[in-house]
């Protein structure tokens, strides 16, 4: 007798195949808002394991409802309404003011970094706009670019930050892709 003989092994029917159209039953635990937390395929569990999961508050969910929950039926995630037990489209809660602030802050900082890194090349000493020996030398345009870049660095000091408009790229200036 081996150490594994005391454990039941899952029973898989003889018609088990790798066919993706095979219908399974799922054991799902939902959180307090009705969103799917943990999921197990019932057919992969022993009867004892299935009962233990059911005793812990898991629900047996048929294949069609499982795919509805995932959004595979209509492209929308569904939840199990914790009050009625009905399945309905998940409507995410409105972000809190702090979450809105954090999302906008991250968005503005990403865009600022893109603008700064995309204009770095313009201020290199050997770039024609910045090279006094070049026929494209333009100290006024360099001054304009420096002011633009400083305005980008100062955006966090604005009164309504992060709900602001970013400074406008000077006319005639193109961002350089940072991956080039």
Image (cartoon, grey):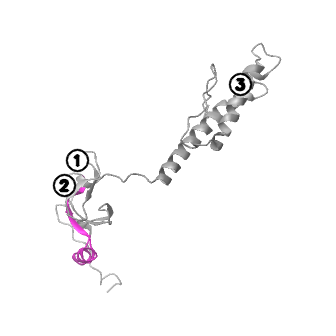
Label 3 close to label 2 by CB (< 8 Å): no
- Residue at the spot 31% in from the left edge and 87% down from the top edge: 1
How crowded is the residue under tag 1: few (<14 C-alpha within 10 Å), some, or many (20+)?
A: some
Asked whether residue 18 appears in the rendered view, the answer is no
Circle 3 is placed at which residue position?
144
- Alpha carbon distance from label 3 to label 1: 54 Å
Q: Of all residues shown, which one is farthest toward the right?
A: 133
- Alpha carbon distance from label 3 to label 2: 61 Å
Tag on residue 73?
A: 1
Is 49 located above or below residue 70 in the figure? below
First in sequence: mark 3 vs mark 2: 2
First in sequence: mark 3 vs mark 1: 1
3 vs 2, front mark: 3
Q: Nearer the viewer, residue 90 or 58?
A: 90
Q: Which residues are magenta?
A: 45-67
Query: Where does residue 101 sit, x and y in percent of width and height?
Result: 52, 49
Q: Does 58 lie within the magenta span?
A: yes
Query: Where does residue 78 sit, x and y in percent of width and height?
Result: 27, 54
The picture quadrant where one finds residue 60 is bottom left
Query: Where does residue 27 sit, x and y in percent of width and height?
Result: 25, 66
- Residue at the spot 44% in from the left edge and 54% down from the top edge: 96
Residue at disc 2, secondary structure: helix
Label 2 close to label 1 by CB (< 8 Å): yes
Tag on residue 121?
A: none
- Residue at the spot 68% in from the left edge and 39% down from the top edge: 153
Q: Nearer the viewer, residue 6 or 132?
A: 132
Asked whether residue 162 appears in the rendered view, the answer is yes
Q: Of all residues shown, which one is farthest toward the bottom?
A: 1
3 vs 1, front mark: 3
Circle 2 is placed at which residue position?
64
């Amino acid at each position: 007798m081996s150490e594994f003989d005391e454990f039941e092994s899952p029973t898989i029917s003889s018609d088990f195949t790798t066919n993706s159209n095979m219908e399974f039953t799922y054991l799902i635990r939902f959180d307090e808002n009705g969103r799917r937390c943990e999921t197990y395929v019932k057919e992969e569990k022993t009867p004892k394991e299935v009962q233990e999961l059911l005793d812990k508050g898991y629900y047996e969910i048929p294949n069609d409802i499982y795919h509805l929950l995932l959004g595979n039926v209509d492209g929308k995630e569904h939840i199990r309404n914790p009050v009625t037990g009905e399945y309905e489209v998940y409507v995410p809660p409105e972000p809190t003011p702090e979450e809105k602030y954090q999302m906008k802050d991250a968005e503005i900082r990403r865009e600022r970094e893109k603008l700064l890194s995309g204009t770095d090349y313009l201020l290199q000493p050997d770039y024609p706009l910045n090279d006094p020996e070049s026929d494209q030398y333009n100290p006024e345009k360099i001054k304009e670019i420096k002011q633009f870049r400083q305005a980008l660095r100062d955006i966090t000091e604005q009164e309504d930050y992060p709900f602001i408009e970013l400074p406008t790229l000077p006319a005639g200036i193109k961002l350089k892709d940072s991956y080039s």
